[in-house]
Image: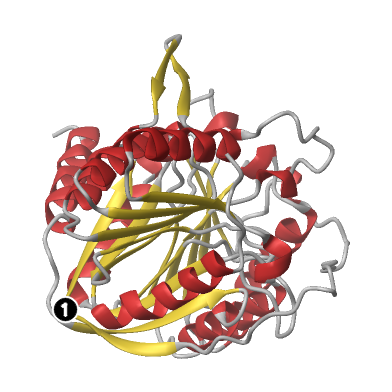
Protein backbone atom coordinates (compact mmCIF):
# COMPACT_ATOMS: atom_id res chain seq x y z
CA UNK A 1 0.00 0.00 0.00
CA UNK A 2 1.31 3.45 -0.90
CA UNK A 3 2.96 5.14 2.08
CA UNK A 4 1.42 8.50 1.15
CA UNK A 5 -2.03 6.90 1.32
CA UNK A 6 -1.23 5.53 4.78
CA UNK A 7 -0.14 8.98 5.94
CA UNK A 8 -3.35 10.54 4.60
CA UNK A 9 -5.38 7.93 6.50
CA UNK A 10 -3.38 8.75 9.64
CA UNK A 11 -4.10 12.46 9.18
CA UNK A 12 -7.84 11.76 8.86
CA UNK A 13 -7.69 9.63 12.01
CA UNK A 14 -5.90 12.44 13.87
CA UNK A 15 -8.58 14.92 12.86
CA UNK A 16 -11.22 12.49 14.16
CA UNK A 17 -9.38 11.96 17.45
CA UNK A 18 -8.61 15.63 18.02
CA UNK A 19 -12.21 16.65 17.34
CA UNK A 20 -13.37 14.61 20.33
CA UNK A 21 -13.22 15.84 23.89
CA UNK A 22 -10.78 14.45 26.41
CA UNK A 23 -11.67 13.52 29.97
CA UNK A 24 -11.16 15.75 33.04
CA UNK A 25 -7.52 16.58 33.69
CA UNK A 26 -5.10 18.85 35.50
CA UNK A 27 -3.43 21.80 33.79
CA UNK A 28 -0.83 24.41 34.68
CA UNK A 29 -1.21 27.84 33.12
CA UNK A 30 1.25 30.60 32.41
CA UNK A 31 1.59 33.86 30.56
CA UNK A 32 4.38 35.66 28.75
CA UNK A 33 6.35 37.67 29.65
CA UNK A 34 5.75 37.13 33.36
CA UNK A 35 6.20 33.41 33.97
CA UNK A 36 6.35 31.50 30.67
CA UNK A 37 10.04 30.68 31.12
CA UNK A 38 9.68 29.27 34.65
CA UNK A 39 6.62 27.25 33.61
CA UNK A 40 8.39 25.74 30.61
CA UNK A 41 11.60 24.98 32.52
CA UNK A 42 9.61 23.26 35.25
CA UNK A 43 8.03 20.94 32.68
CA UNK A 44 11.33 20.15 30.93
CA UNK A 45 12.99 19.34 34.26
CA UNK A 46 10.48 16.51 34.85
CA UNK A 47 11.44 14.63 31.67
CA UNK A 48 12.87 11.17 32.27
CA UNK A 49 12.64 9.54 28.84
CA UNK A 50 11.55 11.66 25.86
CA UNK A 51 10.79 15.26 24.87
CA UNK A 52 9.23 15.88 21.44
CA UNK A 53 9.14 19.52 20.34
CA UNK A 54 7.67 21.22 17.27
CA UNK A 55 8.76 24.86 17.22
CA UNK A 56 8.76 27.70 14.72
CA UNK A 57 11.59 29.66 16.36
CA UNK A 58 14.01 28.61 19.09
CA UNK A 59 16.80 30.75 20.53
CA UNK A 60 16.09 30.88 24.28
CA UNK A 61 19.36 30.27 26.15
CA UNK A 62 17.96 28.97 29.44
CA UNK A 63 15.68 26.49 27.63
CA UNK A 64 18.60 25.43 25.42
CA UNK A 65 20.70 24.77 28.52
CA UNK A 66 17.85 22.81 30.12
CA UNK A 67 17.51 20.56 27.06
CA UNK A 68 21.28 20.04 26.89
CA UNK A 69 21.21 19.00 30.55
CA UNK A 70 18.39 16.54 29.81
CA UNK A 71 20.39 15.08 26.90
CA UNK A 72 23.36 14.52 29.23
CA UNK A 73 20.95 12.87 31.70
CA UNK A 74 19.94 10.34 29.03
CA UNK A 75 16.62 11.87 27.98
CA UNK A 76 15.85 11.61 24.24
CA UNK A 77 15.26 14.98 22.55
CA UNK A 78 13.42 15.10 19.22
CA UNK A 79 13.16 18.64 17.86
CA UNK A 80 11.33 19.76 14.72
CA UNK A 81 12.25 23.30 13.72
CA UNK A 82 11.20 25.56 10.84
CA UNK A 83 14.34 26.36 8.86
CA UNK A 84 13.02 29.51 7.16
CA UNK A 85 11.25 31.68 9.78
CA UNK A 86 11.26 35.20 8.36
CA UNK A 87 13.39 33.67 5.57
CA UNK A 88 16.21 32.46 7.84
CA UNK A 89 17.08 31.17 11.31
CA UNK A 90 18.55 33.87 13.54
CA UNK A 91 22.16 33.81 14.72
CA UNK A 92 20.94 32.88 18.20
CA UNK A 93 18.76 30.16 16.67
CA UNK A 94 21.76 28.76 14.81
CA UNK A 95 23.77 28.73 18.03
CA UNK A 96 20.90 26.95 19.79
CA UNK A 97 20.91 24.15 17.20
CA UNK A 98 24.70 23.89 17.40
CA UNK A 99 24.61 23.52 21.19
CA UNK A 100 21.91 20.86 21.01
CA UNK A 101 23.72 19.03 18.20
CA UNK A 102 27.01 19.12 20.14
CA UNK A 103 25.26 17.53 23.12
CA UNK A 104 23.74 14.88 20.85
CA UNK A 105 27.16 14.07 19.37
CA UNK A 106 28.66 13.13 22.74
CA UNK A 107 25.55 11.24 23.85
CA UNK A 108 25.26 7.50 23.37
CA UNK A 109 21.50 7.88 22.91
CA UNK A 110 20.77 7.30 19.22
CA UNK A 111 17.19 8.55 19.61
CA UNK A 112 18.28 12.20 19.81
CA UNK A 113 17.48 13.95 16.55
CA UNK A 114 16.88 17.36 14.98
CA UNK A 115 14.34 17.62 12.17
CA UNK A 116 14.34 20.62 9.82
CA UNK A 117 11.21 21.58 7.89
CA UNK A 118 13.20 22.56 4.81
CA UNK A 119 11.16 21.78 1.74
CA UNK A 120 12.07 25.03 0.02
CA UNK A 121 15.59 23.65 -0.28
CA UNK A 122 14.33 20.35 -1.65
CA UNK A 123 12.96 20.98 -5.13
CA UNK A 124 10.63 23.65 -3.74
CA UNK A 125 8.22 21.11 -2.21
CA UNK A 126 6.82 21.44 1.29
CA UNK A 127 3.50 20.64 2.94
CA UNK A 128 3.16 23.93 4.79
CA UNK A 129 4.06 27.52 3.99
CA UNK A 130 5.46 27.58 7.53
CA UNK A 131 5.67 25.02 10.30
CA UNK A 132 4.45 27.65 12.77
CA UNK A 133 3.26 25.32 15.57
CA UNK A 134 4.46 25.58 19.17
CA UNK A 135 3.84 22.32 21.02
CA UNK A 136 5.75 19.82 23.11
CA UNK A 137 5.15 16.34 24.54
CA UNK A 138 7.08 15.18 27.62
CA UNK A 139 7.41 11.49 28.49
CA UNK A 140 4.16 10.70 26.64
CA UNK A 141 2.48 12.28 29.66
CA UNK A 142 2.44 16.08 29.43
CA UNK A 143 1.20 18.21 26.54
CA UNK A 144 2.69 21.74 26.36
CA UNK A 145 0.94 24.20 24.02
CA UNK A 146 1.78 27.87 23.63
CA UNK A 147 1.11 30.95 21.56
CA UNK A 148 4.82 31.72 21.91
CA UNK A 149 8.06 30.55 20.43
CA UNK A 150 10.99 29.39 22.55
CA UNK A 151 12.63 32.78 22.13
CA UNK A 152 13.93 35.56 24.35
CA UNK A 153 10.73 37.53 23.71
CA UNK A 154 8.33 34.62 24.11
CA UNK A 155 10.10 33.26 27.20
CA UNK A 156 12.12 36.13 28.68
CA UNK A 157 14.29 35.83 31.77
CA UNK A 158 13.10 37.11 35.12
CA UNK A 159 12.50 40.86 35.05
CA UNK A 160 12.94 41.07 31.29
CA UNK A 161 10.26 42.31 28.94
CA UNK A 162 8.71 40.16 26.27
CA UNK A 163 5.56 39.69 24.27
CA UNK A 164 2.06 38.86 25.53
CA UNK A 165 1.22 35.20 25.11
CA UNK A 166 -0.67 32.37 26.82
CA UNK A 167 0.61 28.89 27.70
CA UNK A 168 -0.73 25.61 29.06
CA UNK A 169 0.70 22.30 30.25
CA UNK A 170 -1.97 19.61 30.29
CA UNK A 171 -1.78 16.10 31.72
CA UNK A 172 -4.24 14.33 29.46
CA UNK A 173 -3.63 11.13 27.50
CA UNK A 174 -6.05 11.90 24.67
CA UNK A 175 -4.41 15.26 23.99
CA UNK A 176 -0.92 13.79 24.36
CA UNK A 177 -1.70 11.04 21.85
CA UNK A 178 -3.09 13.58 19.38
CA UNK A 179 0.06 15.72 19.63
CA UNK A 180 2.29 12.67 19.26
CA UNK A 181 0.33 11.68 16.17
CA UNK A 182 0.82 15.10 14.63
CA UNK A 183 4.51 15.01 15.51
CA UNK A 184 4.85 11.65 13.75
CA UNK A 185 3.19 13.07 10.65
CA UNK A 186 5.11 16.36 10.76
CA UNK A 187 8.50 14.62 11.04
CA UNK A 188 7.77 12.01 8.38
CA UNK A 189 10.54 11.87 5.79
CA UNK A 190 8.20 10.47 3.13
CA UNK A 191 6.95 13.94 2.16
CA UNK A 192 10.51 14.99 1.25
CA UNK A 193 10.25 18.29 3.09
CA UNK A 194 11.99 17.27 6.33
CA UNK A 195 15.72 16.83 6.88
CA UNK A 196 16.68 14.44 9.69
CA UNK A 197 19.93 15.15 11.57
CA UNK A 198 21.22 12.78 14.25
CA UNK A 199 24.19 13.40 16.52
CA UNK A 200 26.48 11.52 14.14
CA UNK A 201 25.37 13.59 11.13
CA UNK A 202 26.97 16.93 10.25
CA UNK A 203 24.82 20.03 10.43
CA UNK A 204 24.04 21.67 7.06
CA UNK A 205 26.49 24.42 6.16
CA UNK A 206 23.86 27.15 6.58
CA UNK A 207 23.61 26.14 10.25
CA UNK A 208 27.29 26.63 10.97
CA UNK A 209 27.59 28.52 14.27
CA UNK A 210 27.92 32.28 13.91
CA UNK A 211 29.95 32.48 17.16
CA UNK A 212 27.69 35.33 18.28
CA UNK A 213 26.59 35.32 21.90
CA UNK A 214 23.03 35.31 23.18
CA UNK A 215 22.25 39.02 23.51
CA UNK A 216 18.85 40.58 23.95
CA UNK A 217 18.19 44.28 24.30
CA UNK A 218 14.97 45.46 25.91
CA UNK A 219 13.31 48.67 27.00
CA UNK A 220 14.17 48.90 30.68
CA UNK A 221 11.41 51.48 31.18
CA UNK A 222 8.90 48.66 30.89
CA UNK A 223 8.20 46.54 33.97
CA UNK A 224 6.64 43.09 34.18
CA UNK A 225 3.81 42.49 36.64
CA UNK A 226 5.18 39.14 37.89
CA UNK A 227 1.89 37.31 37.38
CA UNK A 228 2.16 33.83 38.99
CA UNK A 229 1.47 30.53 37.27
CA UNK A 230 -1.52 28.52 38.44
CA UNK A 231 -2.96 25.00 38.43
CA UNK A 232 -6.56 24.35 37.38
CA UNK A 233 -8.93 21.54 36.57
CA UNK A 234 -9.96 21.14 32.93
CA UNK A 235 -13.16 19.20 32.27
CA UNK A 236 -12.64 18.88 28.51
CA UNK A 237 -9.90 19.67 25.99
CA UNK A 238 -10.00 19.72 22.20
CA UNK A 239 -7.05 19.95 19.81
CA UNK A 240 -7.49 22.17 16.77
CA UNK A 241 -4.97 22.42 13.95
CA UNK A 242 -4.13 24.09 10.69
CA UNK A 243 -3.94 23.72 7.73
CA UNK A 244 -7.65 24.43 7.38
CA UNK A 245 -8.49 25.77 10.85
CA UNK A 246 -11.24 28.14 9.70
CA UNK A 247 -14.11 25.78 10.44
CA UNK A 248 -12.83 25.14 13.97
CA UNK A 249 -12.73 28.88 14.68
CA UNK A 250 -16.18 29.38 13.22
CA UNK A 251 -17.51 26.57 15.39
CA UNK A 252 -15.94 28.08 18.50
CA UNK A 253 -17.29 31.58 17.88
CA UNK A 254 -20.73 30.34 16.87
CA UNK A 255 -21.00 28.31 20.08
CA UNK A 256 -20.93 31.44 22.25
CA UNK A 257 -24.02 32.19 24.32
CA UNK A 258 -22.96 35.40 26.10
CA UNK A 259 -19.43 36.75 25.56
CA UNK A 260 -16.25 36.54 23.50
CA UNK A 261 -12.89 38.08 24.42
CA UNK A 262 -10.49 37.91 21.48
CA UNK A 263 -6.78 38.88 21.78
CA UNK A 264 -4.77 38.51 18.58
CA UNK A 265 -1.48 39.51 17.08
CA UNK A 266 -2.81 39.62 13.51
CA UNK A 267 -6.40 40.00 12.31
CA UNK A 268 -6.53 41.60 8.85
CA UNK A 269 -10.01 42.59 7.69
CA UNK A 270 -9.29 41.32 4.18
CA UNK A 271 -7.32 38.19 3.49
CA UNK A 272 -4.57 38.51 0.93
CA UNK A 273 -5.64 37.34 -2.52
CA UNK A 274 -5.72 33.67 -3.35
CA UNK A 275 -5.89 33.11 -7.11
CA UNK A 276 -6.34 36.87 -7.43
CA UNK A 277 -9.48 37.00 -5.27
CA UNK A 278 -9.73 39.09 -2.08
CA UNK A 279 -12.17 37.90 0.59
CA UNK A 280 -13.22 39.29 3.95
CA UNK A 281 -11.52 37.48 6.79
CA UNK A 282 -14.07 34.85 7.95
CA UNK A 283 -13.03 35.42 11.58
CA UNK A 284 -13.97 39.09 11.25
CA UNK A 285 -17.30 38.02 9.72
CA UNK A 286 -17.95 35.57 12.56
CA UNK A 287 -17.19 38.14 15.25
CA UNK A 288 -19.62 40.56 13.62
CA UNK A 289 -22.26 37.87 13.33
CA UNK A 290 -21.79 36.98 17.00
CA UNK A 291 -22.37 40.62 17.98
CA UNK A 292 -25.47 40.68 15.78
CA UNK A 293 -26.77 37.74 17.85
CA UNK A 294 -26.34 39.87 20.98
CA UNK A 295 -23.05 38.34 22.11
CA UNK A 296 -20.81 40.81 23.95
CA UNK A 297 -17.63 40.85 21.87
CA UNK A 298 -14.34 42.51 22.78
CA UNK A 299 -11.41 42.43 20.35
CA UNK A 300 -7.91 43.48 21.47
CA UNK A 301 -5.32 43.65 18.70
CA UNK A 302 -1.58 44.18 18.57
CA UNK A 303 -0.21 47.61 17.74
CA UNK A 304 1.36 46.98 14.32
CA UNK A 305 3.37 50.19 14.68
CA UNK A 306 5.69 48.32 17.04
CA UNK A 307 7.03 46.66 13.89
CA UNK A 308 6.56 49.69 11.64
CA UNK A 309 7.68 52.67 13.76
CA UNK A 310 8.47 54.89 10.79
CA UNK A 311 5.09 54.52 9.10
CA UNK A 312 3.12 57.76 8.90
CA UNK A 313 0.22 57.99 11.40
CA UNK A 314 -1.95 58.91 8.44
CA UNK A 315 -1.40 55.48 6.88
CA UNK A 316 -3.52 52.87 8.72
CA UNK A 317 -1.94 49.47 9.28
CA UNK A 318 -3.71 46.10 9.08
CA UNK A 319 -5.00 45.80 12.64
CA UNK A 320 -6.02 49.46 12.66
CA UNK A 321 -8.04 48.94 9.48
CA UNK A 322 -9.79 45.97 11.09
CA UNK A 323 -10.44 47.88 14.31
CA UNK A 324 -12.03 50.86 12.53
CA UNK A 325 -14.10 48.58 10.30
CA UNK A 326 -15.51 46.68 13.30
CA UNK A 327 -16.15 49.86 15.26
CA UNK A 328 -17.95 51.45 12.30
CA UNK A 329 -20.13 48.37 11.98
CA UNK A 330 -20.81 48.33 15.72
CA UNK A 331 -21.82 51.98 15.77
CA UNK A 332 -23.98 51.89 12.66
CA UNK A 333 -25.76 48.67 13.69
CA UNK A 334 -25.75 49.33 17.46
CA UNK A 335 -23.85 46.14 18.21
CA UNK A 336 -22.34 45.08 21.58
CA UNK A 337 -18.86 45.01 20.01
CA UNK A 338 -15.79 46.87 21.30
CA UNK A 339 -12.31 47.00 19.77
CA UNK A 340 -8.98 48.32 21.05
CA UNK A 341 -5.38 48.43 19.91
CA UNK A 342 -3.10 47.43 22.78
CA UNK A 343 -0.98 50.10 24.46
CA UNK A 344 2.28 48.16 24.86
CA UNK A 345 3.93 50.77 27.10
CA UNK A 346 1.02 50.87 29.54
CA UNK A 347 0.57 47.08 29.55
CA UNK A 348 4.33 46.53 29.96
CA UNK A 349 5.00 44.23 27.00
CA UNK A 350 6.92 44.41 23.73
CA UNK A 351 3.89 43.46 21.61
CA UNK A 352 0.89 41.13 21.56
CA UNK A 353 1.90 37.75 20.18
CA UNK A 354 -1.19 36.05 21.57
CA UNK A 355 -3.75 34.14 19.50
CA UNK A 356 -6.23 33.56 22.30
CA UNK A 357 -10.00 33.47 22.71
CA UNK A 358 -12.21 33.23 25.80
CA UNK A 359 -15.83 32.18 25.21
CA UNK A 360 -18.61 32.57 27.78
CA UNK A 361 -16.01 32.72 30.59
CA UNK A 362 -15.83 28.91 30.43
CA UNK A 363 -13.79 27.97 27.36
CA UNK A 364 -10.33 29.20 26.38
CA UNK A 365 -8.31 28.80 23.21
CA UNK A 366 -4.51 28.77 23.58
CA UNK A 367 -2.92 28.54 20.14
CA UNK A 368 -0.30 29.45 17.56
CA UNK A 369 -2.99 30.32 14.98
CA UNK A 370 -3.03 33.93 13.77
CA UNK A 371 -6.01 35.41 11.91
CA UNK A 372 -4.21 35.48 8.55
CA UNK A 373 -4.91 33.36 5.49
CA UNK A 374 -1.56 31.59 5.71
CA UNK A 375 -2.02 30.75 9.38
CA UNK A 376 -5.57 29.48 8.94
CA UNK A 377 -5.21 27.73 5.59
CA UNK A 378 -1.58 26.97 4.73
CA UNK A 379 0.58 26.64 7.87
CA UNK A 380 1.03 23.84 10.36
CA UNK A 381 -0.51 25.32 13.51
CA UNK A 382 -1.87 23.87 16.72
CA UNK A 383 -4.09 24.98 19.58
CA UNK A 384 -6.11 23.71 22.52
CA UNK A 385 -9.64 24.65 23.47
CA UNK A 386 -10.01 23.90 27.17
CA UNK A 387 -13.26 23.93 29.09
CA UNK A 388 -12.54 25.28 32.54
CA UNK A 389 -14.00 28.29 34.32
CA UNK A 390 -10.76 28.45 36.32
CA UNK A 391 -8.63 28.67 33.18
CA UNK A 392 -10.99 31.24 31.66
CA UNK A 393 -10.76 33.28 34.86
CA UNK A 394 -6.95 33.18 34.85
CA UNK A 395 -6.52 34.21 31.24
CA UNK A 396 -9.55 36.47 31.50
CA UNK A 397 -7.93 38.50 34.28
CA UNK A 398 -4.87 39.01 32.07
CA UNK A 399 -7.05 40.00 29.13
CA UNK A 400 -8.93 42.42 31.39
CA UNK A 401 -5.71 44.05 32.52
CA UNK A 402 -4.47 44.39 28.93
CA UNK A 403 -7.87 45.82 27.95
CA UNK A 404 -8.05 48.35 30.79
CA UNK A 405 -4.52 49.58 30.09
CA UNK A 406 -5.35 50.26 26.43
CA UNK A 407 -7.25 53.40 25.34
CA UNK A 408 -10.49 53.68 23.45
CA UNK A 409 -10.07 54.16 19.70
CA UNK A 410 -11.20 57.48 18.29
CA UNK A 411 -13.22 56.39 15.29
Please tell me which residue lies in front, 325 or 112: 325
**Left or right: residue 23 compared with residue 247:** left
**Left or right: residue 248 compared with residue 231:** left
Residue at 76% x, 60% y: name it: 92
Which image quarter: residue 120? top right
Please tell me which residue lies in front, 163 or 340: 340
Residue at 68% x, 37% y: name it: 87
- Residue 71 against residue 311 in the figure, above or below: below
Residue on which disc 1 sits? 235
Which image quarter: residue 346? bottom right
- Residue 282 against residue 252 in the figure, above or below: above
Query: Where does the N terminus fall, quadrant-wise?
Result: top left
Q: How is the image coloured?
A: secondary structure
Residue at 31% x, 39% y: name it: 288
Q: Position of residue 80 (x, y in %)?
A: 49, 56
Q: Position of residue 384 (x, y in %)?
A: 31, 63
Please tell me which residue lies in front, 127 or 344: 344
Amino acid sequence: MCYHFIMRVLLIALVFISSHYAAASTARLGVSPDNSLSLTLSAISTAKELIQINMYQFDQKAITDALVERIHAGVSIQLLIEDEPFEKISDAGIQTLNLLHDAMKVSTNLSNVIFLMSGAKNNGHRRYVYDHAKYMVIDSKLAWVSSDNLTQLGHPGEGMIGDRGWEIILEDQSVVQSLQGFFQVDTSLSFQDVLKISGSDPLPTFLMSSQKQFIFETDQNLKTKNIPTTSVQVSHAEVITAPNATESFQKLIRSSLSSIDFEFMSLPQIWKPSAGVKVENPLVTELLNAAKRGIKVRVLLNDDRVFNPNTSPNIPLENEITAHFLLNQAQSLHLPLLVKIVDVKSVGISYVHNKGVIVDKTRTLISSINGTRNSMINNRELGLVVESSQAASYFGSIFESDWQHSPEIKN
